[in-house]
Image (cartoon, rainbow, N blue to C red):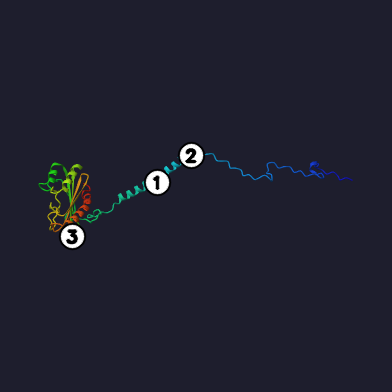
Amino acid sequence: MSDPQRPGPPWPPEQYNRAGETEWIPRVQGGRRPDEPFQFQEETPRPAGNPALTWALRIAGLVAIAVVSGLVFWYVSSSDDTTTAQNPPPVSDTQVPDGQFAFTKHPDLPNPVRDTDCVKNSYNNSKVRTLLTDTRCESMTRALFTTEDGGHKIYTSVAVVRMANETDAQKLRDLTDGNNTGNVDDVVKAKLVKVEGLNTLANGGYDSIQDGRDVVIVESDWAPGGKRTEAEGKRLAKISLDATRLGKTITSGT
């Protein structure tokens, strides 16, 4: 008696292996054969950029950084300047700019003396007086300072002669730097202040500078006056040279 038929589709005939036949296995499409070597897939190259655009962007970035840095520096500098202007350092009545020698205003002449008659305040019958007579001198400002050197108290007269122009100022300086040409009166010679043992500072050390229309003339000596040795004269001249910087302090605001 045969087995009763069971419901369901019949088995396809190819699913049964016949005796002596090799089982058929369908090939998987797209796979790699065992004997096929492994291959790396090359990465798709990126599209080439625009070199000009790249450099333009880099330059623009650098310019932006420079602009920002400049604005920051300007802001900081402006803040510092504003602070300084609002809070100026205190300045004493006797304070003068720093230099090799420490100068102090003479107590008997604490303020500079300004005069508009330059001819009257020059040596009589001198080439300097002739020049001041023939050319226009706007003003003469003088002051007296003291300093210490080699155990001596040094008296230093600073005179600032303001001429009409730089050419006349150069002519005046050439004459005052020469020999036997005269000079302007120092504060002791002009009797603006009395120093015991001195009638003038002209026998000590001398120096001068020109600053535009201004001629700064400086003479230094100690009391009592007298003939100085060559070494002493050079030392006094060095003091006078250092004191030429005081010209700006006595003419500030004029």
Q: Residue furthest bottom?
A: 151
Identify the residue under disc 3: 152
Identify the residue under disc 2: 51
Q: Earlier in the sequence, mark 1 or mark 2?
A: 2
For label 3, the crowd category at 10 Å Cα-Cα, with few meaning under 14, some 14 to 19 and many 20 or more, is: few
Residue placed most toward the observer, 197 or 80: 197
Please indicate whether residue 44 sits to the left or right of residue 234 in the image. Answer: right
Q: Earlier in the sequence, mark 2 or mark 3?
A: 2
Whole-number angstrom distance, CA of label 1 to CA of label 2: 27 Å
Q: Earlier in the sequence, mark 3 or mark 1?
A: 1
Q: Measured from the top left, where is residue 129 in percent x and y?
A: 12, 45
Whole-number angstrom distance, CA of label 3 to CA of label 1: 55 Å
Residue placed most toward the observer, 192 or 240: 240
Which residue is located at x 12 percent, y 45 percent? 127
Q: Residue furthest right?
A: 1
Three-letter code, disc 3: His
Q: Measured from the top left, where is residue 51 in percent x and y?
A: 48, 39
Given this view, does label 2 or label 3 mark the residue nearer the observer?
Answer: 2
Given this view, does label 3 or label 1 mark the residue nearer the observer?
Answer: 3
Q: Is residue 51 visible?
A: yes
Identify the residue under disc 1: 69
